[in-house]
Amino acid sequence: MPFFAGIDSGATKTLAVVGDDKGNIVGRGRSGPGNYQLVGLDAAMTAVREALDAACAEASRSRGDLARVALGLAGADRPVDFEELERGSRALLGETPFRVLNDTWVALRGGTKAGWGAVSISGSGANAAARSRDGRQAVLHAMGYETGNRGGAADIVRDAMHWAFCSLERSGPRSLLETEIPKLMGFKDLDEMMTSSYAYEDLMRVSPLVFELANRGDQAAQDILVSIGTAQGDQVVGVIRQLGMEAEQVEVVLAGSVYKGKNPLLVDAMHLTIHRTCPAARLHLLAYQPGVGAYLMALEDHGLTADDQVYANLDRTAGDLKGIKTED
């Protein structure tokens, strides 16, 4: 029986999934950040290796037993990125056939059975991509604000810090962000926080706080969510427009930890923005985590089909790999 592996590796975590040719998930493994643009190629490939070896061990298999691997890697953007990541993947996988993809595509595959549609990713960073019925593709450059990209947790944190200091200095509306951000970070106030050191990873906890304060009626927090949701909607519209799918009933898959936020304003703003141009679009959370989407792509790259029985087995064996993980 052949076994296949799918990898989803991003700015904060890496997930590997191993399954057989019938949709049964038999192994999963997790490790740390794998965006090589942030951590370097060696560290990124180490994260992939650790996650994949853990998944293989749970499946009582080794890397050499795999028939094919699909790697959805954040940072796979430019031709030079693919050259580097394919070189690192070849060194890791030896003669095992594999394919390196931008991580948007494995998220789309995990979110829809149709094989076409659009996907919006909002984790630490953000991206959007779309595939048409006839296989044409569009994806953002996603190299940061300067390349027209905005919408992840890092942008929420940046906006939150901005408006917290505007509140402190009376150059903007009063906001609970002024007092709640330093409290969350363990400081007396923003002045103490500004003169102290703290880890960037800790600052990312501000993103869920913005959702919480929006629920408490804080206007600045609410405006941040609306602004981020509008930006994400604009980016989805952009990739849909590139493929001429504005009038189609496009599935838009939402993937990434930001979409588990406990206030609806971000997704509401996204809905409104997308529906202005694509009135028949349907937004929903992904059905399976992107690592499962990568596994399905590996299976299909081998010439197999994800039929109803494969999905029935997935539903039975995927467990916590369904939907967005709450600890992301």
Image (cartoon, helix red, strand yellow):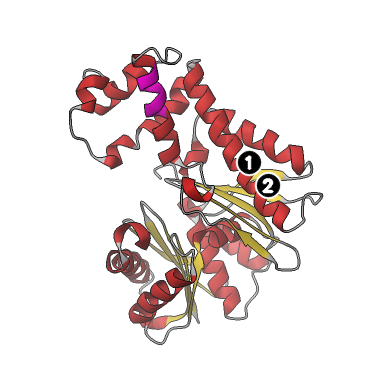
Q: Main secondary structure of the magenta part?
A: helix
Callout 1 touching callout 2 (CB < 8 Å):
yes
Left or right, 254 with reference to 180: right
Q: Is residue 230 above or below residue 74?
A: above
SS under mark 2: helix
Q: Where is residue 213 drawn, in percent x and y?
A: 44, 21
Instruction: Tell me what residue is drawn at x 72 percent, y 62 percent.
Output: 132
Left or right, 15 with reference to 129: left
Pick out the residue farthest to the left: 196
* Range of residues picked out in magenta: 160-166
Q: Is residue 304 above or below residue 237?
A: below
Left or right, 252 with reference to 218: right
Q: Where is residue 68 drawn, in percent x and y?
A: 49, 79
Q: Where is residue 121 drawn, in percent x and y?
A: 53, 49
Quadrant where the image shows the C terminus: top left
Instruction: Tell me what residue is drawn at x 35 percent, y 75 percent.
Output: 88
Q: In the drawing, what numbered circle is on residue 174?
A: none
Q: Amino acid at mark 2?
A: Val
Q: Where is residue 323 drawn, in percent x and y?
A: 53, 48
Q: Is residue 5 visible to us here? A: yes
Q: Say which of 122 and 113 sits in front.
A: 122
Residue 18 covered by magenta stretch: no
Q: Say which of 66 and 146 sits in front.
A: 146
Circle 2 is placed at which residue position?
Answer: 237
Question: Residue 181's quadrant in the figure?
Answer: top left
Instruction: Tell me what residue is drawn at x 34 percent, y 64 percent.
Output: 51
Question: Residue 199's quadrant in the figure?
Answer: top left
Q: In the drawing, what numbered circle is on residue 233?
A: 1
SS under mark 1: helix
Q: Amino acid at mark 1?
A: Gly
